[in-house]
Amino acid sequence: MKLVDWYTREDFGKELIITLLKTKSYSFIQLSLDWNDYGGGPYFQLCSGNHRLLDIIFTIGRFGIALEILGPTWNRNYIND
């Protein structure tokens, strides 16, 4: 188990991903801060279920935030560090 893990990725912008209390298959909190190359209108999504306690996505213009509480660990294998 890792207490804190973070990494960045670039795909149509820059993204920082921070994970707290991470195991191999689940994490307590995962947070993504995103600066996108292409702006868009405001977007908000709130989800629960499907092996997740709470999932929030918020985007306004070029900035985006994604927060997940008690959910599967995001796959890092396809990301180029």
Image (cartoon, grey):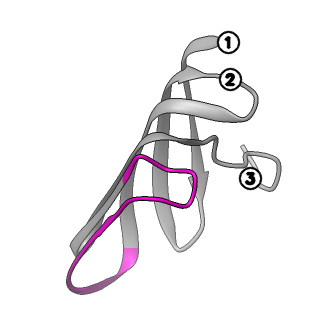
Magenta region includes residue 31:
no
The answer to whether mark 1 and mark 2 are in CB contact below 8 A is yes
Mark closest to the chain's N terminus, 3 or 2: 2
Percent position of residue 7, x then y: 58, 36
Percent position of residue 49, x then y: 47, 59
Assign the N terminus to one quadrant of the image: top right
Residue 79 is marked as: 3
Distance from the alpha carbon under mark 1 to that under mark 2: 5 Å
Q: Which residue appears farthest toward the right when viewing the image? A: 77
Q: SS for tag 1?
A: loop
**Residue at horizontal 49%, vertical 50%?**
52
User: Dot 1 corresponds to which residue?
Assistant: 1
**Residue at horizontal 63%, vertical 13%?**
2
User: Dot 2 corresponds to which residue?
Assistant: 23
- Start-end of magenta stretch: 37-54
Q: SS for tag 2?
A: loop
Percent position of residue 42, x then y: 17, 81
